[in-house]
Image: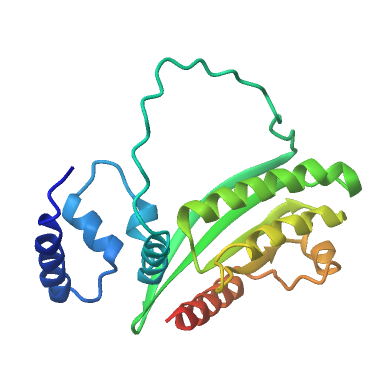
Amino acid sequence: MRDPARIPELCELLQRTWQRSPDLRLGQLVVNAIKPESPCPAVFHAEDNTIRRGLNALVERGAEAPPIPPLGPIKLEWETVAEPPATTLSFDGIRLASFDAGPWWCEVLEVRVGGEYREGSRGNPDAQAMAVHVAALLARYEPDVILLDLSRLRYRWGNSILRVFEVIARFGGAFPVEVVVRGGPESAPALGTLGLIVQTDEAAALEEAKSKALRRSMAIG
């Protein structure tokens, strides 16, 4: 068991270091101190409120779990439960942008999807592929806003695409992740029939994303 006496010392050192750079998030401070060989975006970009909620959850969970007993030689028996959905979509790129607006730190995750979204129920695998892709990115980066760039997508009709927006709405807990949709000539008209607000201008989409990111960051506090 590690010496518990180290905890106050480390906490005091953390406090003195952080007070010298109060604009840094806790995750930034830890990554800057460790200087890992591989990037740690999930830690580096984590908001202090996210860490606070996680720490509170650990406190509420009670006493530390007992140590795991030795497992011995165990043979794993694998079973394929699902095949990746075959899709005609292309996932063209991912970008993460961050900016400061006064005391608030904001992040926008841009996800580009192109290719052909098949019509009607034939598009179900395409919707599933998009949902899985977006969910994995949201879990990894935890942005304030996801800018879903569908300007290179050919989409005519199919309600299953709304699953993607249901997935996004489940992230963020009390402060759901916002979404901005950018469409193109082969997607915007049909997306609009689903009740979605679609930006066709890149600059306008970015401005909407920045505005929504700031509003969410201010709401979190």
Q: How many marks?
A: 0
Q: Quadrant of residue 27?
A: bottom left
Residue 202, x across and y down, in percent: 60, 68
Between 62 and 42, the one lying in front of the other is: 62
**Which residue is at a point 15% across and 59% down the rendered structure image?**
7
**Which residue is at a point 39% across and 54% down the rendered structure image?**
42
Q: Quadrant of residue 16?
A: bottom left
Residue 185, x across and y down, in percent: 77, 61
Residue 219, x across and y down, in percent: 49, 82
Quadrant housing the C terminus: bottom left
Q: In the image, is residue 176 above or below residue 92? A: below
**Which residue is at a point 41% across and 23% down the rendered structure image?**
71
Between 23 and 205, the one lying in front of the other is: 23
Q: In the image, is residue 19 above or below residue 165? A: below
Residue 1, x across and y down, in percent: 18, 42
Between 30 and 115, the one lying in front of the other is: 30
Q: Quadrant of residue 22?
A: bottom left
**Which residue is at a point 15% across and 76% down the rendered structure image?**
19
Residue 138 lies left or right of residue 13; in this view the side is right
Residue 143 lies left or right of residue 12; in this view the side is right
